[in-house]
Amino acid sequence: MLEKGRIWEAAVNVKTKKEWKKLLLQTLKIAVGSSVAIFIAQYLGLEYGVSAGSITLLTLVTTKWETVKLSLCRLITFVITVVLAGITIGPMESGWVAYGIFVFLLIGVCHLLGWQATISVNSVIGTHFLMSEDFGFDFIFNEFLLVLIGITIAVILNLFYDYRHQKNGLVRSMRYTESRLQAILGKMAAYLAGEELPRSVWDDIRKLEGEQEEFVRDACEYQDNTFHSHPGYYIDYFEMRLKQVGILHNLHYEIKKIRNMPRQAKIISEYIVYMAQYVVETNSPDEQIQKLEGIFEEMQREPLPVTREEFEGRAVLYHILMDLEEFLVFKKRFVEGLDEGQKERYWKKEK
């Protein structure tokens, strides 16, 4: 129990440090980027130069790919903004009415295109046209430079990313996941062997499920912060483990239904103990599946149950065996989805 407590405490500390480090880095990027963007805009003598800082702030999102895609969307919708401002703010005398119509049309167009994230910057550009009442080429070019400076600074700053730290964090999450799966399976095996099942098992499963969802998000963020073609290995891994945690829900439900433990339960308990030691990243479960098939065959050769209790207990054991088979099949599919390059990179070089 002390060792498990240390593992959990270490995991919490790593998670807290990771969140604080990410927040600090993102805050630093925004502060530096906004200041630099304003400096460049003012150095070039642009009107409304401080808006360049706001554009940088609104463009600096979590991942590189999101920043690049948002930047391209800002450039495209800038043209739309100029056109909409020209047909609404330009000819109308009432400024507040014109701006209201402009924003209405802008939001509608951005929603149709699925680019809602560009609305804030474009609405600010619209206020510049409203205040200046200038639709000449020089002023339009002025606004274009503000957008260009803001998104360029954002893209450059998002090149600075702590790849190694996040990758190491994902590997630690993998080792943590495997240890928790092994521990939960061990408790279930002990119950089938006649020991008491701790009440905390259900909470352990639910907690691990929530953690896997978080690990999937971390893996997606890591992948989106790479410009090269990335195999998505970590995403596939944690999604596979998330499915296996779902099987643990079924296993827990099944074993709790057993009122009188059949003698065959000891065989399954021993198998779970054997199987749990192979719940590791680099194992292909072919041998475990083959051994499980042998247990199925052995169970079929057993004498038929005599009493109702024996029949119900045996039926539950079959369900448990099928759940274990599905647990292994998820890992087998994950392994079969890997190519030789991925095995070489992730199973040999990085471990």
Image: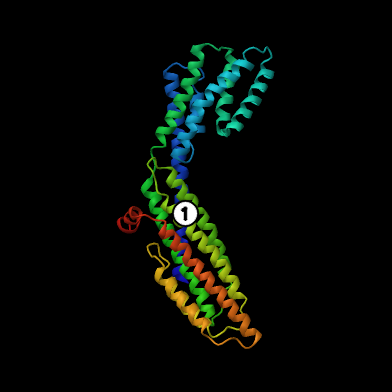
Q: Please report the residue visible at 47 percent of the width from the left and 54 percent of the height from the top.
A: 15
Q: Please report the residue visible at 40 percent of the width from the left and 65 percent of the height from the top.
A: 280
- Image location of residue 208, percent across then percent down: 52, 61
- Image location of residue 176, percent across then percent down: 44, 62
Q: Is residue 239 in view?
A: yes
- Image location of residue 279, percent across then percent down: 43, 67
- Residue 214 drawn above or below residue 189: above
Front-most of residues 124 and 69: 69
Front-most of residues 237 and 8: 237
Q: Amino acid at mark 1?
A: Lys
Q: If the image is split into quadrants, where does the C terminus sit? A: bottom left
Q: Please report the residue visible at 51 percent of the width from the left and 81 percent of the height from the top.
A: 299
Q: Which residue is mark 1?
A: 15
- Colour pattern: rainbow
Q: Secondary structure at mark 1?
A: helix
- Relative to 38, is 124 on the left or the right? right
Outermost residue on the left side: it is: 349
Front-most of residues 63 and 251: 251
- For mark 1, does the 10 Å Cα neighbourhood hold few (<14), some (14 to 19), or many (20 or more) residues? some
- Image location of residue 321, percent across then percent down: 52, 74
